[in-house]
Amino acid sequence: VQAWDSVSAWGALTLPRKLVIGTAAVLQLIVGSALAADYILFDTICFRKFEIASDIDASLIDGGLAGNVLNIVRLPIGVVILTLACAAVCLHLVHHVELRWAAKRLQTDLC
């Protein structure tokens, strides 16, 4: 725990580590804002409005998905937002794994 606290303190992070976690946070904010806007706006920008009781086989105009569940994602904004969300998660994981390795190295050096 002490090794983790030492390597994860903001002042102890190197510039590349700060950039990785900072970029992940900014991407998550962008994705969250886009999803909030998608929920609030009358005309959605990321995902089509679809309810559990809706018919998947109905046409897009009739509130369905034209037989393809992937039609729930609006092109191109929906794909961009999903890609940004995946990138944010991957960057967060990279940051976490790298800090875990650094903490293990520090702990090994202390022992």
Image (spheres, rainbow, N blue to C red):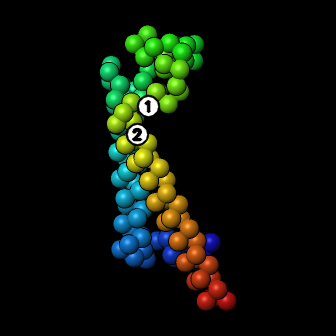
Query: Does the image show residue 36?
Result: no
User: What residue sits 54% from the left and 18% below the top?
Assistant: 56
Q: Nearer the viewer, residue 21 or 59?
A: 59
- Graded by Cα atoms within 10 Å as few (under 14), some (14 to 19) or many (20 or more), the crowding at tag 1 reads some
Q: Going 35% across and 74% down the picture, which residue do you hit?
A: 15
Residue 105: percent from the left, percent from the top? 59, 83
Label annotation for residue 73: 1
Relative to the observer, which residue lies in front, 37 or 65?
Answer: 65
Q: Vertically, is 103 above or below 86?
A: below
Identify which amino acid the numbered label 1 is placed on. Val
What is the number of the mark on residue 51? none
Q: Can residue 72 be seen in this snapshot?
A: yes
**As rendered, which of 40 and 66 lies closer to the eye?**
66
Could you give the CA–CA distance between mark 2 and mark 1, rounded to whole angstroms?
7 Å
Name which quarter of the figure residue 44 lies in. top left
Q: Quadrant of the N terminus?
A: bottom right
Q: Are marks 2 and 1 in contact (CB under 8 Å)?
A: yes
Residue at disc 2, secondary structure: helix
Q: Residues within 10 Å of mark 2 (few under 14, many from 20)?
A: some
Quadrant position of residue 79: top left
